[in-house]
Amino acid sequence: ERETLVQQNGAEVGTPVGLTFAIQMETCIDDMMWDIEMHDKYQWEYELGIHEFFGMRSNRLIVKEPIGVVGAITPWNFPFMLNLSKVIPALAAGNTVVLKPAPDTPWSATHIGKLVAEYTDIPAGVFNLVTSGDAANVGEMLTADPRVDMISFTGSTVIGKRIMARGAETLKRVFLELGDHARFAL
């Protein structure tokens, strides 16, 4: 699907084809493969051994488990890369994902949904995609829904603060990658 993705990404974001092959697509596919390979190598459970504290002996076991439902909210720039960088690690860790791409760039996300449906054995309902022309409405619903256990957001600091506050109401884990490049525009 690489050639289709190159053309689609160029049309959706307006990026030159040369950048699509490099930054917009190839590196994120390489990163995806690393995530997939890491899944089989990752130590999900291990013992720390016996520890004695105030005369009490304890056997310590570390078990890493999925968080649950991850709401992944992505911006318009580098949509294919950012969608994959949120979805693949979350799925590899055993989570269910609800991906909400930016309203300006839904094609990359919908193409990922198509690839998941046609080429994987991921069960229905494990990877979910919600597109909307009203980004705030869907984001508000994801951040407030008690069935969503974590929000992963890339975007502005102002929206990140809102997501953190909304997530706190239901004790969500929140992962934020924030920047405010738009505030410097004249």
Image: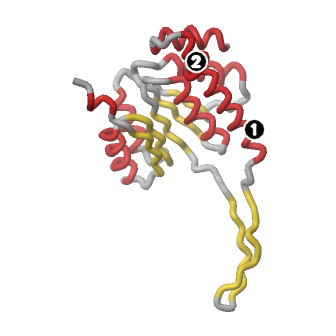
Q: What coloring was used for the rendering?
A: secondary structure
Residue 137: which numbered mark, if any?
none
Residue at 43% of width from left, 28% of height from top? 75
The crowd level at tag 1 (other Cα within 10 Å; few <14, some 14-19, many 20+) is few
Q: CA distance from mark 1 to mark 2?
A: 23 Å
Q: Amino acid at mark 1?
A: Glu
The crowd level at tag 2 (other Cα within 10 Å; few <14, some 14-19, many 20+) is some
Residue 178, by quadrant, is top left
Q: Amino acid at mark 2?
A: His
Q: Where residue 65 appears, x then y in whole percent?
A: 65, 54
Q: Where residue 101 appears, x then y in whole percent?
A: 46, 27
Where is the C terminus found, in terms of image quarters?
Answer: top left
Name, please, the residue furthest toward the bottom: 55
User: Can you say whether 141 is above or below 130 in the image?
Assistant: below
Where is the N terminus found, in terms of image quarters?
Answer: top right
Residue at 38% of width from left, 53% of height from top? 168
User: Can you say whether 107 is above or below 148 in the image?
Assistant: above
Sequence-wise, the earlier of marks 1 and 2 is: 1
Residue closer to the observer: 182 or 104: 182
Residue 37: which numbered mark, if any?
1
Q: Mark 2 sits on what residue?
A: 111
Disc nearest the viewer among 1 and 2:
1
Q: Where residue 147 appears, x then y in whole percent?
A: 49, 46
Residue 111, by quadrant, is top right
SS label for mark 2? helix
Q: Classify residue 134 as left or right of residue 11.
A: left
SS label for mark 1? helix
Residue at 45% of width from left, 51% of height from top? 172
